[in-house]
């Protein structure tokens, strides 16, 4: 390794989509990225946090066999660097003196040239790293071609301590591998933190983030480079894989990255829609399902899920089934057929009357003398769920379940019925946003979406009053407040954890807020049994919000 300081560095930033547990596949991806970086003359390839393991590996990383497989893969990649090609910065779990660290390793000239450990292990929201890793010591910079490079890992930049230590020990620039998941507000938060660290340290930085879906989390990429004057030199797109060569030069006042392409980022509803698509796509692909099947009811939730599925997988891998009963309107039949035709999917109609009536007949002696109620409504939903699961079992396609966050919050869903399924792309979208996303998708689709251009659902689906159609003339607002009111209250209860009294003080009816809070609390047992789904808000059900099922605490207004 040359001891002469470099005056120029070509650094390849790799924004890729590793798979948790696929050590061989992730190694192959790293090798391919290195070959592409070599073709462009790169000195160094930067891969993301825990790349060789996939992120987040959760308790898988505690298995000694998995730790050994990751170490072997890193050593094999290190051996590759003896060919004179680019060095590699790569993240991996690393066992050192019996302690397991979240590590980043510099591989150069056929060997592991340096190792640094993540200091600040996050333990909030979707993160649980203190459960599996030991925090590393405060790091100094890594020497590479005579340049002192600081390599803080993801959370290490969210407080100033690690960057301050790196600056004080002589770091000249910062390369930051990340596994930072998407949420609606994340872009401004990341940029604000990065700018603060640049201002405090006077150092330029490259923020390199992975993309792809991993269970409930979606990683959006959006990697970028800031120079020491806080100017944005490079911006990679979000929700797309990229390997970008960045050119760095030593100036009199320090290192600077040459300005390059600054891709526009998807934000707001567009970003949420793209996250739902990539989350569903990777859940299906990484778990090796041949495709998906879903019930297409003629309502807005199943319509948006069908559109997301086609955008994720292509029409040929999406099977939609209408499961009508006596309460299914002709309007719903025609709307469902229109969605299926617009999307180009296989569409079957499977009436459920025989199944429902057989179950009602079986229960009739026990239910004699009792009025029809939600029990019979739930039977319809459970017959539909059973039929969809049977189609899944027979043909191998995964059932997509279609309940939105408003329903998940209030328990407005049937266990072992419409909650049946392997994955839910709209689980973290309130009903009011589902309406917005339907309008959005009718006029736009994400880059690389596989569905058709133009409208994919009739206007009537968006404008008609929502209904579960489980009894005559049923409407959602028979048992729920209007969604614009319900969702506003839920957002305050779930995302912001506001006290009931404070929500009432903001102008909401006290009895209604108390009722919604009660529905939210008593539906916890349903949410524990719900399929995983894409996280897009600051607090999703599952990773972010873990309430006890048995819970007698209630607030008063």
Image: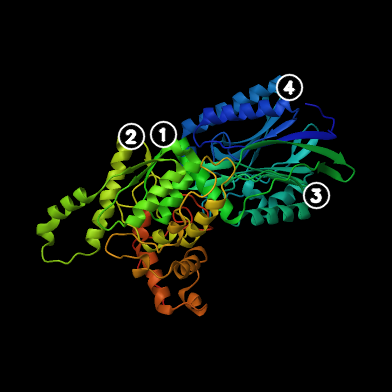
For the residue pair 557 and 52, the one nearer the viewer reads as: 557
N-terminal of the two: label 1 or label 4? 4
| Circle 3 residues within 10 Å: few <14, some 14–19, many ≥20 | many
Query: Given contact means CB atoms under 8 Å apart, are the residues at marks 2 and 4 in contact?
Result: no
Would you name the residue on which mark 4 appears? 84
| Circle 2 residues within 10 Å: few <14, some 14–19, many ≥20 | few
In screen coordinates, is 241 left or right of 375? right
- What quarter of the picture does the C terminus occupy? bottom left
Looking at the image, residue 146 lies above or below residue 39: below
In screen coordinates, is 372 left or right of 194? left
Tell us which disc is closer to us: 1 or 3: 1
N-terminal of the two: label 1 or label 3? 3
| Mark 1 vs mark 4, CA separation in Å | 41 Å
Would you name the residue on which mark 3 appears? 228
Q: How many marks?
A: 4
Residue 318 percent location from the top left of the image: 42, 40
Q: Secondary structure at mark 4?
A: loop
N-terminal of the two: label 3 or label 4? 4
Would you name the residue on which mark 1 appears? 290
Labelled disc at residue 395: 2
């Amino acid at each position: 390794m040359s001891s002469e300081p470099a005056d120029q560095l070509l650094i390849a930033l790799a924004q890729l989509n590793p798979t948790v547990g696929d050590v061989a596949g992730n190694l192959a991806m790293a090798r391919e990225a290195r070959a592409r970086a070599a073709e462009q003359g790169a000195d160094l390839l930067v891969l993301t946090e825990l790349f060789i393991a996939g992120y987040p590996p959760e308790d898988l990383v505690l298995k000694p066999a998995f730790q050994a497989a990751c170490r072997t893969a890193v050593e094999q990649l290190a051996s590759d660097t003896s060919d004179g090609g680019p060095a590699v910065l790569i993240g991996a779990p690393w066992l050192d003196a019996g302690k397991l660290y979240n590590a980043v390793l510099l591989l150069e000239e056929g060997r592991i040239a340096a190792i640094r450990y993540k200091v600040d292990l996050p333990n909030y929201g979707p993160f649980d790293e203190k459960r599996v890793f030991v925090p590393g010591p405060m790091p100094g910079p890594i020497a590479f071609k005579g340049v002192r490079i600081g390599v803080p890992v993801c959370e290490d930049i969210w407080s100033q301590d690690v960057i301050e230590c790196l600056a004080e020990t002589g770091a000249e620039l910062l390369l930051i591998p990340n596994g930072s998941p998407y949420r609606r507000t994340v872009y401004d938060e990341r940029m604000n933190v990065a700018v603060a660290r640049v201002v405090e340290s006077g150092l330029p930085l490259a923020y390199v983030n992975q993309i792809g879906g991993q269970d409930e989390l979606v990683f959006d990429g959006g990697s970028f480079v800031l120079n020491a004057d806080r100017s944005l030199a490079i911006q990679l797109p979000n929700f797309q894989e990229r390997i970008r060569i960045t050119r760095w030069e030593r100036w009199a006042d320090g290192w600077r990255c040459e300005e390059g392409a600054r891709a526009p980022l998807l934000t707001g509803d567009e970003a949420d829609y793209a996250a739902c698509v990539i989350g569903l796509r990777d859940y299906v692909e990484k778990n090796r399902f041949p495709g998906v099947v879903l019930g297409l009811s003629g309502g807005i939730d199943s319509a948006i899920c069908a559109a997301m599925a086609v955008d994720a997988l292509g029409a040929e891998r999406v099977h939609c089934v209408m499961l009508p009963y006596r309460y299914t309107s002709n309007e719903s039949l025609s709307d469902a057929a229109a969605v299926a035709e617009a999307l180009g999917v296989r569409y079957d109609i499977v009436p459920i009357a025989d199944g429902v009536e057989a179950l009602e007949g079986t229960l009739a002696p026990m239910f004699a003398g009792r009025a029809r109620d939600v029990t019979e409504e739930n039977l319809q939903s459970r017959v539909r769920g059973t039929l969809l699961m049977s189609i899944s079992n027979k043909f191998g396609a995964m059932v997509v379940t279609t309940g939105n966050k408003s329903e998940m919050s209030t328990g407005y869903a049937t266990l072992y019925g419409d909650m049946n399924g392997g994955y839910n792309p709209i689980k973290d979208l309130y009903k009011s946003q589902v309406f917005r996303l339907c309008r959005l998708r009718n006029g736009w689709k994400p880059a690389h979406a596989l569905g058709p251009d133009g409208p994919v659902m009739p206007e009537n689906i968006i404008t008609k009053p929502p209904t579960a159609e489980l009894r005559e003339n049923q409407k959602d607002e028979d048992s729920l407040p209007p969604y614009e009111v319900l969702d506003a209250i839920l957002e305050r209860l779930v995302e912001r954890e506001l006290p009931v009294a404070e929500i009432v003080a903001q102008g909401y009816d006290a009895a209604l807020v108390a009722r919604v809070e009660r529905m939210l609390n008593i539906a916890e047992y349903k949410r524990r049994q719900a399929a995983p789904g894409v996280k897009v808000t600051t607090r999703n059900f599952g990773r972010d919000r873990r309430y006890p099922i048995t819970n007698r605490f209630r607030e008063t207004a």
